[in-house]
Amino acid sequence: MTKQEPDRPRRPGAVGWEGAAFEPLMKRDFESLARFRFGIRRHLRFSEETVRGNGLTPQRDHLMPALKGSPDRQWATVREPADRLQSRRHSVAEPVDRAQEQGLVERGAHPGDGRAVRVSLTPEGERMAWKAHRAPFGPGPAGPIVST
């Protein structure tokens, strides 16, 4: 099997780089992708401006829902928000340290694993998370992230 040149148009049902069949992307596909990415960036910018106005950094802001949003409990290990944020554990440990210094999170013993550490929001962290997220939870000032 030979690879097609990257700039050569592909036929519908052609074999892709990994041998899988695919349909070629059309102009309207790129327009949809551009709208989608614009919506995400607009929402993220709005959220970042909102959380900065409430005394949080965007990095700590991303950490708080990752901790609070753990299914079936009010805490998370450092690994869980790292997975949710698509980061490495050591990249999340630093914002956890800073948030702990600010009194926004606390560490504790994991109930079932002596090697892991439980991280949860303090009452002040809960208040800051609520304050920062009550406004950007909606579509933002410029409309929904994705229009249909």
Image (cartoon, rainbow, N blue to C red):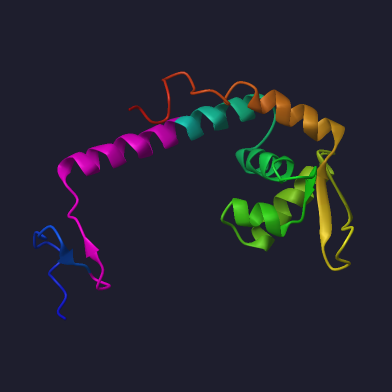
Q: Is residue 136 above or below residue 99?
A: above
Q: Quadrant of residue 117?
A: bottom right
Q: Report the side of 109 relative to 96 (left or right).
A: right
Q: Report the side of 44 relative to 71 (left or right).
A: left
Residue beneath the point at 63% across and 29% down: 51
Q: Quadrant of residue 24?
A: bottom left
In the displayed orientation, state which residue is furthest to the bottom.
1
Q: Percent from the top left, x then y, of residue 112? A: 87, 62
Residue beneath the point at 9% across and 59% down: 9
Q: Report the side of 86 relative to 35 (left or right).
A: right
- Judge whether residue 41 is colored magenta: yes
All told, the count of numbered labels is: 0
Residue situated in front as seen by the camera: 73 or 3: 73
- Judge whether residue 24 is colored magenta: yes
Q: Quadrant of residue 52?
A: top right
Q: Give the residues drawn in magenta, as a range.
A: 17-42
Q: Percent from the top left, x then y, of residue 85? A: 59, 51
Q: Which image quarter is the C terminus in?
A: top left
> Magenta region's main secondary structure?
helix
Q: Is residue 99 above or below residue 114?
A: above
Q: Which image quarter is the N terminus in?
A: bottom left
Q: Percent from the top left, x then y, of residue 143? A: 42, 20
Q: Percent from the top left, x then y, of residue 35? A: 31, 34
Q: Is residue 5 above or below residue 53?
A: below
